[in-house]
Each structure stands twice: as structure tokens, then as C-alpha cells.
Amino acid sequence: MATKEFDELALDGTNYPIWASDIKINFASRGILNTIEEPNDGDPAIEPRKLNTTLFLLRLYIHKDLKHEYMLETSPLNLWKALKERYDQQKELIWPEANYEWVHLRLQDFKTVAEYNHAVHNICSRLKFCEQEPTEAEKIEKTLSTMLPEDRI
């Protein structure tokens, strides 16, 4: 039995971006990433053993209800596309929340600068995923504009 190296895809897809990234990294390290990518003209056929391994791993890392829903899917590429189509809209769901957090982020709401920096990096990584990452100048402006006047040097 294979041990799980990372979390499975949640039924509601809330962890889809991280899950998809983990899957791609895992498959690249195993040399089977091409099994979930569109083939180019002239590419050699993929070995059935690699296809079966990929399908097994994809099914291992998805919620049990998704396994039942997609149980007739025998192509790892088609399963990958179906999951991507179903959950790739996460950008539209993540952006409003991350943007709200960015707009309302204030340095004085944190006990330490380290906690503030952690929050900034967390929000910025989600905004980057949504292709809306603030520039370094915007990050500096955000920090300076939310500092209390007596804390400025």
C-alpha cells in the first residue's frame, strides 16, 4: 500500500491549487508528468504501466466521493482535465478574500513584525496565484501607510 506524501484533493476543491502543484511535482520526480499533459505530434506512445501508475496516484490523492464520481475514467489525462475544469475556478474564489485581506491589512494589528510579514507573504502568495500580486513598492507603501506615526523613524 502506498503511503500518502501530501493531502488528497478535498471534495469542495478548496485545496486544489496546492494539490495540483503537489501532483505535478510528484509526477515530475517520478518521470510521469507527461501522462497528464497534452501530447505533441510525434511524441512516442506512453507505456501502459506509466499510465496505470499515474491513474492510481491520481485516484489515491482525491476524495473518496470523487473516486466514485470518476470511477469510469480510465485515462489519467482525461481525469486530470476533468478535475482541472471542475476546480480551476479557484482563482475567482480566492481573489476576493485575499484582496479584502490586503486592503484591510494593518501593521498595528500584529504583535510582532514577523507575524505581519508572515501575513503579507501569505496574502501575496494567494494574490500571485490569482495573477494580482502587489509590487514591492506597493508592499512598502502598505506597511508605511499602516504604521502608527509614533512608530516611524
Image: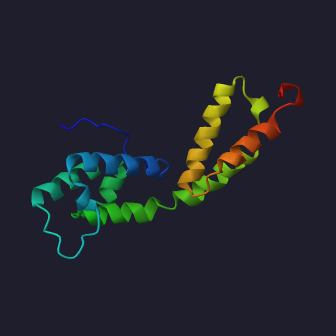
Residue at 71%, 49% in the rendered image: 100
Q: Residue at 11% x, 60% y: name it.
A: 48
Near-viewer residue (59 or 71) = 59
Q: Is residue 44 above or below residue 118?
A: below
Q: Is residue 39 above or below residue 95?
A: below
Work out which quarter of the rendered image holds the N terminus and state it: top left
**51 displayed left or right of 73:** left
Q: Is residue 53 left or right of residue 133?
A: left
Is 112 positioned to the left or the right of 34 in the image? right
Residue 131, percent from left and from top: 57, 58
Res 61 visible: no
What residue is shown at x 59% (from left), y 39% (from top)? 121
- Residue 117 seen: yes
Which quadrant would the C terminus be assigned to in this image? top right
Residue sitting at the far top: 111
Farthest residue toward the front? Answer: 153
Residue 55 at x, y percent in the picture = 22, 55
